[in-house]
């Protein structure tokens, strides 16, 4: 099938979600093609070409800055010429806006915030959470094209391709009702836990151990994160929250300290490469997702781990 991934960019940089969309496109394309679409910044086409069979690089009047009406307009022109089977967009503020616009114009099905997709003999099966993450449903989509918005931070495996770049000049068919005036940047986050290779996450059971956890994080070159109660208590900032209403992370190592393992938390970290949990309750559900677990008091075990690490500092990995 032909799977199109709509790349996002701002101030000359691609949003990493663009590559995740292409990773998913490569996973589901079968003997078809993964095709990136970038609107308004030709210079980013080369990076996309390393993850896609084809890159459609669209330029035209007033397309440099994101405008939902103009971008939907040129996407629809492209899809008229090059009919897609599936269109992937990030489950981002741009994706929320563009995806339904395109789906309505194409009269086709749309599923938002998917976390999994696999090809079927006819169409696709996609998975998404419902009821605020309490249940997951599988949906079969047999009509094409279909539009999917994809949760960020999930499809991280990298495919190295060297796709061809096709440049297209397309102008919106009518002037948009909205105009781009200026970009107001959000306040800089303290950290981006999604990019961390090592995370030390503290839960309600480890709030008294913040200093020790900070020391552990420093020793392993990691970043501090937390469960929702820890964020709500103000101990850590919101940008460090892991889980369904926080961030999805996939570090090389995730150390969960005093975290019970409610599904709203584990949804955001269960795909980490190595999970180590410390909890004094042997029944804590965090042990169901952990690769290694210690039934212990965080306050007692952390000084021992820190001593060991100070004696034998870990060698940095890349
Ligand atoms: C709509 C909705 C969205 C939500 N979103 C999120 C989200 O994004 N992220 C999130 O994390 N949660 C989220 N939650 C909350 C979630 O349901 C849990 O309440 C939360 O994850 C529990 O956090 P916790 O594990 O830190 O605390 P608790 O559940 O209170 O667990 C504390 C754990 O620490 C252990 N413990 C206590 N003392 C020690 C000690 N000294 N040493 C070792 N272990 C100890 C206890 O045995 C226990 O298992 C959400 C809930 C809802 C309803």
Image (cartoon, rainbow, N blue to C red):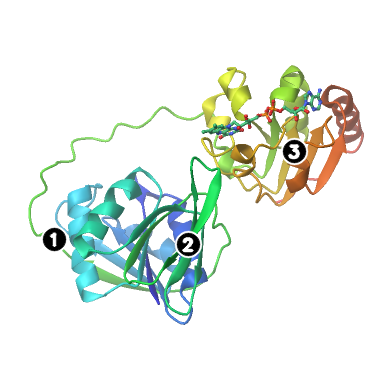
Using residue 68 as the reference point, say whether residue 292 is left or right of it.
Answer: right
> How far across and how far down the image is residue 285, in percent?
74, 40
* Other-residue count near label 3 (Cα within 10 Å), few / some / many at <14 / 14–19 / ≥20: many
Residue at 87% across / 34% down in the picture? Answer: 295
Of helix, strand and loop, which one carries label 3?
A: strand
Residue at 87% across / 25% down in the picture? Answer: 303
Using residue 155 as the reference point, say whether residue 80 is left or right of it.
Answer: left
Asked if the residue under mark 3 is in contact with the one under mark 2, i.e. CB atoms within 8 Å, the reply is: no
Q: Earlier in the sequence, mark 2 or mark 3?
A: 2
Using residue 87 as the reference point, say whether residue 62 is left or right of it.
Answer: left
How far apart are labels 1 and 3 at the CA level?
Answer: 50 Å
The residue where tag 2 is placed is 126
Residue 313 appears in the rendering: no
Residue at 59% across / 28% down in the picture? Answer: 228
Q: Nearer the viewer, mark 1 or mark 2?
A: 2
> How far across and how far down the image is residue 129, in percent?
50, 49
Of helix, strand and loop, which one carries label 2?
A: strand
Q: Nearer the viewer, mark 1 or mark 3?
A: 3
- Quarter of the image with the N terminus in it: bottom left
* Other-residue count near label 1 (Cα within 10 Å), few / some / many at <14 / 14–19 / ≥20: some
* Other-residue count near label 2 (Cα within 10 Å), few / some / many at <14 / 14–19 / ≥20: many
**View quadrant of ligand 1:** top right
Name the one closer to the observer, 178 or 51.
178
> How far across and how far down the image is residue 2, in percent?
37, 75
Label number found at residue 255: 3
The residue where tag 1 is placed is 171
Label number found at residue 249: none
How far apart are labels 2 and 3 at the CA level?
Answer: 30 Å
Residue 17 appears in the rendering: yes
């Amino acid at each position: 099938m032909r799977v199109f991934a709509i790349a996002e960019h701002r101030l000359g940089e691609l949003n990493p979600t663009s590559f995740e969309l292409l990773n998913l496109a490569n996973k589901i394309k079968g003997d078809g093609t993964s095709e990136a679409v970038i609107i308004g910044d030709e210079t980013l086409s080369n990076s996309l070409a390393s993850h896609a069979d084809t890159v459609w690089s669209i330029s035209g009047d007033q397309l440099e800055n994101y405008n939902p009406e103009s971008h939907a307009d040129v996407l629809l022109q492209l899809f008229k010429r090059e009919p897609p089977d599936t269109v992937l967009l990030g489950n981002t503020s741009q994706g929320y806006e563009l995806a339904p616009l395109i789906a309505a114009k194409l009269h086709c099905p749309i599923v938002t915030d998917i976390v999994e997709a696999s090809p079927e003999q006819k169409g696709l099966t996609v998975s998404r959470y419902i009821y605020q993450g309490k249940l997951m449903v599988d949906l079969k989509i047999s009509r094409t094209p279909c539009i999917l918005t994809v949760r960020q931070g999930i499809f991280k495996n990298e495919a190295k391709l060297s796709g061809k770049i096709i440049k297209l000049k397309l102008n919106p068919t009518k002037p948009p009702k909205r105009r781009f005036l200026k970009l107001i940047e959000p306040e800089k986050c303290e950290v981006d836990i999604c990019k961390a290779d090592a995370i030390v996450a503290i839960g309600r059971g480890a709030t008294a151990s913040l200093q020790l956890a900070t020391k552990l994080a420093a020793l392993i070159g990691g970043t501090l994160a937390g469960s929702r109660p820890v964020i709500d208590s103000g101990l850590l900032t919101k940008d460090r929250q892991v889980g369904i209403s926080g961030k999805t992370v996939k570090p090389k190592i995730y150390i969960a300290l005093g975290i019970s393992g409610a599904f709203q938390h584990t949804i955001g970290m269960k795909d980490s490469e190595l999970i180590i949990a410390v909890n004094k309750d042997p029944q804590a559900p965090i042990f169901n997702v952990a690769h290694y677990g210690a039934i212990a008091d965080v306050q007692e075990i952390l000084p021992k781990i820190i001593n060991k690490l100070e004696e034998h500092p870990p060698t940095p990995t890349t």
